[in-house]
Amino acid sequence: MRLTLAARAAAALLAATVAALALPAAAAAHVTVNPSTATQGGYAKVSFRVPNEKDDANTVKVEIAIPTDKPIASVSIKPVPGWTAVTETSKLATPIKTDDGEITEGVSKITWTSDAAAVIKPHQFQEFDVSLGPLPATDQIVFKALQTYSDGEVVRWIDEPAAGAEAEHPAPVLKLTKAGATTGAPANTAAAQDAAATMNDDDGSDGTTITLAVLGLALGFAGLVAGVLAYRRAGRVG
């Protein structure tokens, strides 16, 4: 009986290991902005990463809202083959002062629409690059996003961060640090932005977490198997 119970426990632990491999991937399938950090007052090139989390529909349109309460004077879009980008502007409640005068309107939304050949198919993703700046003096920018599928469903990635709560449809968030907060860090260079993208890439952090979790479960499974074998050897000796 003891051996049977131990075998069942080993099977349950193996099933948990398989689940650990699958669940984090599903949880990470949301729209993100990469890198996830930038510097206040500087310029940054960010990528909005849009995965297709459906098995039977394609992503055909992506909309990103640019907050006007924390205005950004310059918003430039990198072309994506097969996708048409359209920007919308809105009047700013607080004009942006520049050396060339005040800016009273700013980009408030970017909409990318795909042609038939460029859709984001199931289990694929696409990145949409945008240059932003100067970035406002605030702790973070929340970019609410809408993802439209070929079956007509619209997923609203608009949930803002809340302390101690995990949002069901989190909006992409760009954290902003004060200039000079990191000693010795190069300021506003392409190399620095690429390095930040590598260090803060969501996929990289998720991959490390998954690896550590699976390794822990695997070690636990190996220990349980060793215990079962020891129990069987002890039974034979007795």
Image: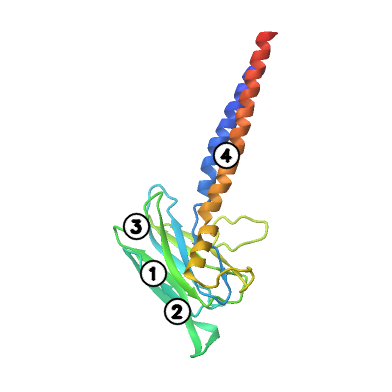
Q: Could you tell which of marks 2 and 3 lies nearer the N-terminus?
A: 2
Q: Which mark is residue 119?
A: 3
**Colour scheme of this structure image?**
rainbow
Side of 70 relative to 124 (left or right): right
Above or below, 23 relative to 181:
above
Above or below, 120 relative to 67:
above
User: Tag 1: residue type?
Assistant: Lys
Q: Could you tell which of marks 3 and 1 lies nearer the N-terminus?
A: 1
Q: CA distance from mark 1 to mark 4?
A: 38 Å
Q: Could you tell which of marks 3 and 4 lies nearer the N-terminus?
A: 3
Q: Which residue is mark 4?
A: 214
CB atoms of marks 3 and 1 within 8 Å: no
Q: Could you tell which of marks 4 and 2 lies nearer the N-terminus?
A: 2
Q: CA distance from mark 4 to mark 2?
A: 47 Å
Side of 184 relative to 62 (left or right): right
Between label 3 and label 1, give the one nearer the viewer: 1
CB atoms of marks 2 and 1 within 8 Å: no
Q: CA distance from mark 3 to mark 4?
A: 33 Å
Q: Could you tell which of marks 2 and 1 lies nearer the N-terminus?
A: 1
User: Tag 3: residue type?
Assistant: Val
Q: CA distance from mark 2 to mark 3?
A: 26 Å
Q: CA distance from mark 2 to mark 1?
A: 18 Å
Q: State the image quarter where residue 238 is shown.
A: top right
Crowdedness of circle 3 by 10 Å Cα count: few (<14), some, many (20+)? many
Q: Which mark is residue 78?
A: 1
Residue 1, visible in the rendered structure: no
CB atoms of marks 4 and 2 within 8 Å: no
